[in-house]
Image: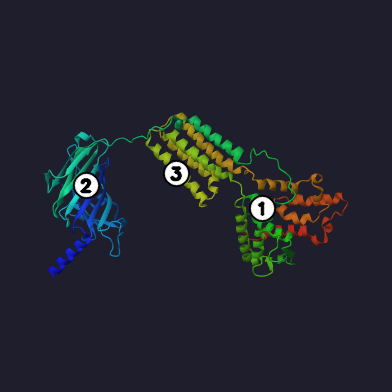
Amino acid sequence: MALVAASAMSQDASQSGTEPATRTLDTKIWVNHDYSIDVSEATAIDVAAAGELQRDLSFPGRKLEPRDVYMIGADVNGGTVNAEVAPLGDGMRIRVRPSPRYTPPTRHPGMRLFEINYRVLYKAVGDDNDSGKLEWPLTSAGDRLPLRGASLRVTLPEETPSDQIHAQFQLDGMPVAEGEHQVSGTRVSFRWDGVVAPGQVLRAVVTFPRVEAAPFAAPPKGPAWMFNATLWLVVFALYYLVAKVFLTGGGDGKPVIVEYEPPAGWSAGAVRLLWHGSWDGRCLATGVLGIAAKGGLTLGKQDDGVWVATRTGDEHMPTLTADERRLRSALFTFGHTAAFSGTNADSIGLAELAYQRALEERCARERPLDPALLLIPGWLIALPAATLLFLGVDSRFAMIGQIFAPGVVGALALAMLMERVPLGILRATRAQAFFVAAICAAGLLGGGDRTDWLAGTALLAGQVAAGWWLPRQRPRDTPLLRKLRGFRWYLGTAEQQEMDARYKPSLHPELQASLLPYAMALDVEVSWNAHFAQALAEAAMPADFVTSLNPDHDQAALDLLDFAQSLARQVPR
């Protein structure tokens, strides 16, 4: 059996191309001001050795507890694995053991590379009078594998005098002349090219004078303009002036041109959604009215007051827009009639939802910029500026504020773009006021110049005022909105003698029913109907102008208006 085992071991060694059961070690240590240390180690073990790593840590004269070692991460050949820390006498053992089903990547053929990152809290650096002493174990008495080569780099605090740093190797507690070590500034480099047998303890010892923790290093002073209160106030005021003149409806200056027809390809429901900027109870009513005015359905009122829509026309009526065809299809999913009643509310609700989605898709690219979105750049100006003015460049809070405050606003803007945060949050001036009050209080406690504090407070107070004022501004007109404004002027104006003769109500009474859905979409249905009464009276026609409509449009206008009013009241939202 011994011969067979020896034969297998020699075969494994010949296949791997390396001597079995050897390892190398590369360690990097950073000594912090509080004398805790951060460690990054890479241990290479050939494939003939066990598939786990045991790293023993012990420091003469000190006892480690599990809470003194904090694992940051571990991986094998680039694949992340778990590591556990367990007590071992006066020290600790870090064990990296992949699961049996773990197959490490083959990025490092012929060996396994274990990489571990951890922190040792306060117990690694001992006291020797006023000096610090780090005795770092490269091997331990419990190691089962020989060490063939090691390197170590120790970085000390920047304030440590380099001429008082000393380094040496110790093997089993005795200084040895083997190995190399070099001190360069506050960095000590060790290199060991020999072989350390299992059971031998090799340590790298670094002694250095303890230094007081340096005060917080202020960030480098930036350009003078970053701390100029007047400049920030001017930039803030100019931004909102530009937003008012160029990004909202104010200062547009373009005349409204009368339009006698609705924009081509736009249904009454889409016009309603685009004009008001949001879905409301009349969007569905105007959509149904638009289909009825184009002959896609007829409306009738039963004796019990319930309105019933009946489908007419073929499947693909060219006069209907895509969103109107979608609404008609949804309304008549279960038959050729649809009752607008409480018992049929679920079916009507589904049709309304489908129509709303169709209109949202139709209006997505034509909607003007919401003025509330213009508050985001205002916050990106006011917050960093107030932080600089409140806390100054010499405060430890300045760097945090300059990074954290814009980061919060940027995260909010990103969340809004992802539709995770509603625009209503930006309009909540009360929440903004509380937020600003907290920042101003922190700025006052920061001890900055009083004039700068007043300027920073003015910036934030101005942003809160903008949060109330800007959402109330009219969005800047797009070309389509200007056409709708001109069309609304035509529908709502009382000066019919100035209109084109071919559109006078007395000559074209059928317009009352055909354009009534658009008049309702633009909230001018009362004025629109009044035009016909006035025009027919001037033409010495009967006062009851409904009876004077063409036979195909008898009662059309009043029926449509009555239906819209009842639907807006009855359909649940």
Left or right? Give the position of 179 relative to 279.
Answer: left
First in sequence: mark 2 vs mark 1:
2
Look at mark 2 in the image and give the residue it sits on.
151
Q: 10 Å neighbourhood of mark 2: few (<14), some, or many (≥20)?
A: many
Look at mark 3 in the image and give the residue it sits on.
407
Q: Secondary structure at mark 1?
A: helix
Amino acid type for the residue under numbered disc 1:
Arg
- Picture quadrant of residue 21: bottom left
Left or right? Give the position of 521 relative to 35.
Answer: right
First in sequence: mark 1 vs mark 3:
1
Q: 10 Å neighbourhood of mark 3: few (<14), some, or many (≥20)?
A: few
Viewer-side residue, 141 vs 6: 6
Look at mark 1 in the image and give the residue it sits on.
272
Whether residue 204 is visible here, answered yes or no, is: yes
Amino acid type for the residue under numbered disc 3:
Gly
Q: Secondary structure at mark 3?
A: helix
Tell us which disc is closer to us: 2 or 3: 2
Whether residue 132 is visible here, answered yes or no, is: no
**For the residues marked 2 and 3, what is the alpha-carbon distance in whole angstroms?**
41 Å
**For the residues marked 2 and 1, what is the alpha-carbon distance in whole angstroms?**
75 Å
Q: Residue at x 67, y 52 (%)?
A: 271
Image spot of residue 139 (x, y percent)? 17, 51
Q: Cβ–Cβ below 8 Å for labels 2 and 1?
A: no
Image vertical order of residue 431 relative to residue 363, above or below: above
